[in-house]
Amino acid sequence: MEPEPHRAPSGEEQLAPYAVHGGDSRGRRFPEPQHAFRSPFQRDRDRIIHSRAFRRLEGKTQVFLSGSVDHFRTRLTHTIEVAAIARTLARRLRLNEDLAEAVALAHDLGHTPFGHRGERVLDAELRHTPSGGFDHNAQSLRVVDLLERKYPGMDGLNLSWEVRAGLVKHRTPETRLDGVLIGEEVDLESQAAHLADDIAYCTHDLDDGLDSGLIRGEDLAGVGLWRRARETALAQGGDPGEASFPSFVVRCLIDLLVGDCLAESARQLAGIANPQTARRGFRVRFSPEVKEMAAELREALFRKLYRHPDVMAVNERTGRIVRGLFRHFLKHPGTMGETARQRAADGSVERAAADYVAGMTDRYARRLWNGIRRGTAPEPVRS
């Protein structure tokens, strides 16, 4: 008897009717045969993890400059935390966990060095060029479609349509992907990844802010979500006198946000029979009350952390590095890496320079800029 062929375990038997099934994927830009033991979205997840852009996230700033303190989050640890929350939401809502995880893992691949300050600088530099600006969400799609080079005969990672669509975060009714109108409809799995990002950056940036001493618990006394999470922590035996108490409150805050999202999303999904109907509206969401409270928490983070004088001073210095590198490569495109030089020769120098700078880690950008200023710049990397 011939042995039964090794078939890919779907792992999708328990999915809700509104979830996306791997077998229903719209496929890849370059068709590929089904893998022997991985579903399409599992392959996407692995391709993202194995990419150079993913590895470089380890050296990119989340809030505090990468390398400044060993236990502060980087863009990579933030991404891992987003993926963990996205999987929790997907599992409890019976969505496709692999798809939600893949979108979460890829969502920041296009982020610049030095966090959002680097993004704002490149956006300002590109705003009056044919590129029309810079957005890290759009850049993430550019990374997986073009900038990564892993496979013969194609650019990019050749990810599934659904993962790529999940990276198109800011939608309008006219939004298209590969010329196909996708409008404002978003798969539930991508909605879960997007909300997981909101939860992670609010709570984990807050955790780092508390750890740094730039924010104190007393500063958050007027923030409703913090008060509610603190009351939960006290009810569970937390001791305000212990050094671990602020982190315990943050843990309770995560549970509060995830729990509210699950309850509200379940209400929104009741009676939904297919993913086509489900994606017509944002159904993975907070309740109106918690949505308002989350906005209050974000506003407090902006006032107390992101706009703290110490953070702003670092942002000003690092912004000058990004601006200086970008303008240097506009004048001297031959000093970029090999593939960036090729893109500059084939198209826009501005776009190629932005791609090159955006892909850098904080460490490499600082080293390169210092070398350029001293006239001893290191050899360019390939990308």
Image (spheres, rainbow, N blue to C red):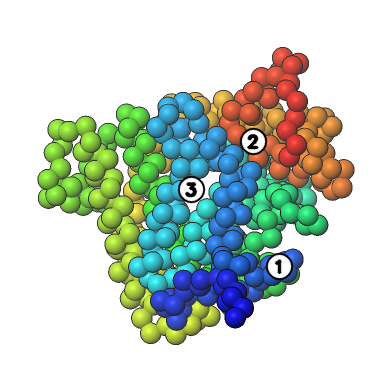
Q: Residue at x 37, y 61 (%)?
A: 88
Q: Residue beneath label 2, please?
A: 360
Q: Could you say where residue 250 lies in the image, as x and y percent from the top left?
A: 28, 45
Circle 2: residue type: Met
Circle 3: residue type: Thr
Q: What is the crowding at mark 2: few (fewer than 14 residues within 10 Å), some, or many (at least 20)? A: many
Q: Residue at x 36, y 81 (%)?
A: 270
Q: Specify the quadrant of the image occupied by residue 210.
A: top left
Q: Kindly check if marks 1 and 3 are in contact, taking CB atoms under 8 A apart as contact.
A: no
Label 2 or label 1, whichever lies nearer to me, is 1
Q: What is the crowding at mark 1: few (fewer than 14 residues within 10 Å), some, or many (at least 20)? A: few
Between 214 and 352, the one nearer to me in the picture: 352
Q: Residue at x 65, y 40 (%)?
A: 359
Circle 1: residue type: Glu
Q: Earlier in the sequence, mark 3 or mark 2?
A: 3
Asked whether, in this view, residue 72 is left or right of residue 118, the answer is left
Q: Answer yes or no: is residue 324 visible.
A: yes
Task: Give me the C-alpha separation between circle 1 and circle 3.
Answer: 28 Å
Asked whether, in this view, residue 221 is left or right of residue 120, the answer is left
- Tag on residue 79? 3
Q: Residue beneath label 1, please?
A: 32
Task: Give me the C-alpha separation between circle 3 and circle 2.
Answer: 17 Å
